Amino acid sequence: MTRLRDRYAALLLDLDGTLYRGPAVIEGAPEALIVGDSKERLVYVTNNASRGPDKVAGHLRELGFPADTDDVVTSAQAAARLLAERLSPGASVLVVGTEDLVREVDAVGLKPLRRFDDAVPDAVVQGHSPETAWPDLAEAAYALRAGALWVAANTDRTLPNERGLAPGNGSMVAALVAATDREPVVAGKPFAPLLEDALERAGTRAALVVGDRLDTDIEGAYRVGLDSLLVLTGVSTAAELREAPAERIPTFVADSLEALNHPPVVSEDPALGPVDLLLRNPGRAVTVRASGSEIR
């Protein structure tokens, strides 16, 4: 039986909660990915729109992961693409987020703004920034109530870091939903735009989505027809699988990325709910496939 990773031509890897928490690497993650005889394309796919791909790649290299700028696909890039597809060149976009998000908007030929007076911007784009404050949300609310297009980079309610779970972009988006009675177009996982961008970058659809969240990574893989691996190093827990709807049941679930380097084997452990369970020891790598699926 082949290793799990050998079934795929590319790995689409989430970052926060999968490879690192805050600035700190998840123990053993670089070693699990860097295996000499493996040939999969590694594409780093992040819902976090706060940093540009060059900064993300630099951080990954500092933590021991092989990463070039072209290996990184961000929700900020996907959001900018959605805006460019829906707006005329030079259209104005109010940015709620970091300067890296501003640069992505500018790179697709649109005019980023932080404030406006009389002329309502054509769109609002919202991505995570730890500096977002009430004046930023208020400015966006004025534009949205005046009819501006709204694109959110992602709607993750929480963001894992070294201290626990902090508010994510989705919490800020929820504030504007409450203030405007509007719903955004979402670029990031679980919606298709970000993962479709990652597949184009990978050059193949024979890809495995790897992440730590049932509501973004796993459901996102389901929506674009890809297999998925849930790692229990971030937000979602094994217990959540008991109540998860079909679109949030991963193809595999594991304690860590080390599962990629082992073949799946059947387990009778009932703790993860009504699914066919796969357990690999040593290495404590656990994998799961929805009940009724054939395991080869």
Image: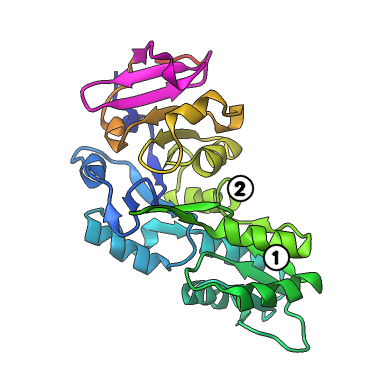
Quarter the C terminus occupies = top left
Q: Which mark is residue 168?
A: none
Which contiguous range is marked in magenta?
266-292
When the figure is inspected, residue 158 is found, relative to residue 290, above or below; the finding is: below
Q: What label does residue 191 carry, if any?
A: 2
Q: Residue at x 39, y 42 (%)?
A: 10
Task: Give above or below for 219 relative to 251.
Answer: below
Instruction: State yes or no: residue 129 in magenta.
Output: no
Q: Helix, strand, or loop for circle 1?
A: strand
Location of the N terminus (image quadrant): top left
Above-or-below relation of 26 to 230: below
Tags 2 and 1 in contact by the CB under 8 Å rule?
A: no
Instruction: Identify which residue, 149 or 245, lies in the foreground.
Output: 245
Task: Kindly identify which residue carries mark 1.
Answer: 150
The secondary structure type at the circle numbered 2 is loop
Looking at the rendered structure, the kind of residue marked 1 is Trp
Measured from the top left, where is residue 265 in percent x and y? 33, 16
Q: Residue at x 46, y 27 (%)?
A: 239
Q: Amino acid at mark 2?
A: Phe
Q: Residues within 10 Å of mark 2 (few under 14, many from 20)?
A: many
Can residue 174 be seen by looking at this rendering?
yes
Compared with 226, 95 (above or below) is below
User: Which residue is at a point 52% across and 57% down the rendered structure image?
Assistant: 168
